Image (spheres, grey):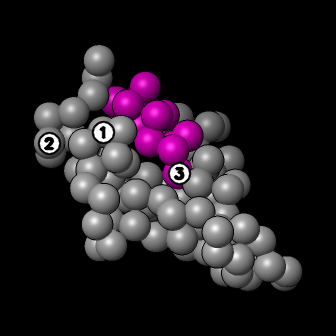
Amino acid sequence: MAFGKQCAVHVHESFVPQESHHVWPLGDGGPNVKANRLLVCSNGHGEIHGYIDLLFKYDNAIPWRIAQHFGDAAKLYAYKGYEQICAAGGRPR
């Protein structure tokens, strides 16, 4: 496991464990290649996946009262994953 102060979603004052996030999630058919991965902390990882789920739940129209609780970087990576899932004909199930 890698440790670092900066992840793709947050900047940390001390070293934290970092996880490999697949922008186009593996569970939704994404490839396990370097170009599809980025390092994030576990909180950032959860934010991205949570926002992807909300994009599907609200058909890409998440109410502001919910969306405001997510950071811009998490939203950006979630939307990139959402677009790839949709382009591949994945979800809703």
Tag 2: residue type?
A: Ala
Our reading of the magenta stretch's main secondary structure is helix
What's the CA distance linking mark 3 and mark 1?
Answer: 14 Å
Q: Residue furthest top?
A: 93
- The answer to which image quadrant residue 85 occupies is top left
Q: Residue 28 bears which disc, if any?
A: 1
Q: Secondary structure at mark 1?
A: helix
- Using the rendered image of the protein, determine whether residue 9 is visible from the camera's viewpoint: no
Mark 2 or mark 3: name the one nearer the start of the chain.
3
Establish if 21 lies above or below 50.
below
Establish if 77 lies above or below 85.
below
Q: Is residue 78 magenta?
A: no
Q: Position of residue 31 (x, y in %)?
A: 25, 56
Q: Position of residue 45 (x, y in %)?
A: 59, 54
Q: Nearer the viewer, residue 87 or 69?
A: 87
Q: Residue 48 bears which disc, if any?
A: 3
The magenta segment is 48-60
